[in-house]
Image (cartoon, rainbow, N blue to C red):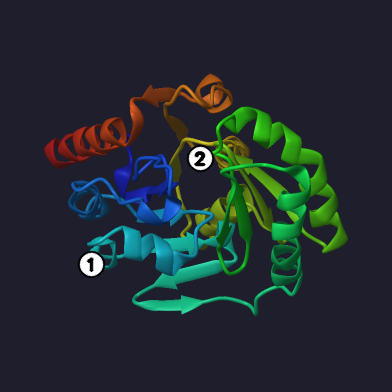
Amino acid sequence: MSDPAGAVIGLDFDGTLSPIVPDPAKAVIHPEAPEVLADLGAHVRAVVIVTGRPAATALELGPGLADVPGLVVLGHYGFERWEDGRISAPPPPPGVPRAEAELPLLLDSLGLAGVTIEDKGRAVAVHTRRSPEPELALATLREPLAKLADKHGLVIEPGRLVLELRPPGMDKGHALSLFLAERSARSVMFVGDDLGDLAAFDAVRASRLPGVTVCSGSTEVAALAERADIVVDGPEGVVTLLREMTAGFARS
């Protein structure tokens, strides 16, 4: 980027800053990421993490993130915001706990083993990663979960061996677009790894700003890599890229 002082750097969390693990509660950020983000933040207009996780959960799984100067975390796809140690968000949607209450009976009726439910507060995720046949379980769940989501006024967000039921009206693309306008960005880069990040890639294109899209590559999701300007090898590759960018900014 030729104008780092006007740049907004947006990043997903899971699969981008943190490796994907079978149990989402045991995810942990790449150990060098907070320091790299802090160094990068000294050169750019803003660093923002845009995640489907609650903001507090991302901070809990990312020791050191809360100390990154100027960092903003947009949780729940942008419904929630952490900045300067404070979280702001609208009231939780009533459809989420209602849908979650019905999930155990639904999963039992489908006879799916190893499928787990993750309560995310403003959303609920159904993971198949620990199922004996993860892809088959995911395919089996698509239609029943879509019907359940529709019943409770929710939408389905697909991901890497996960289907998430969440409120409509916000996605990573909308959240990123609003943030770019708020910060009067002159350029933008977004780094993601999953289908939910496609909306952010679209927002980069739609912004009409000089922009770069980066895929934290994996064998599980090819669609993002096909749309990215740059593909790196998972969170390790993301951290390396950010470190190289920071070094380049420091020299210029």
Question: Please, is residue 215 above or below residue 175 in the view?
Answer: above
Query: Picture quarter containing residue 132?
Result: top right
In the picture of the structure, the residue carrying the numbered disc 1 is 67
Rendered image quadrant of residue 1? top left
Q: Residue at x 54, y 55 (%)?
A: 52
The local secondary structure at tag 1 comes to: helix
Give the amino acid at mark 1: Asp
The percent coordinates of residue 252 (x first, y second) are 17, 37
| Residue at 31% from the left image edge and 51% from the top image edge | 28
Image spot of residue 11 (x, y percent) = 42, 46
x and y percentages locating residue 191 in the rendered image: 43, 39
Left or right: where 68 falls relative to 191? left
Most foreground residue, 92 or 134: 134
2 and 1 marks in contact (CB < 8 Å): no
Mark 2 sits on what residue?
A: 130
Element type where label 2 sits in the image:
loop
Q: CA distance from mark 2 to mark 1?
A: 34 Å
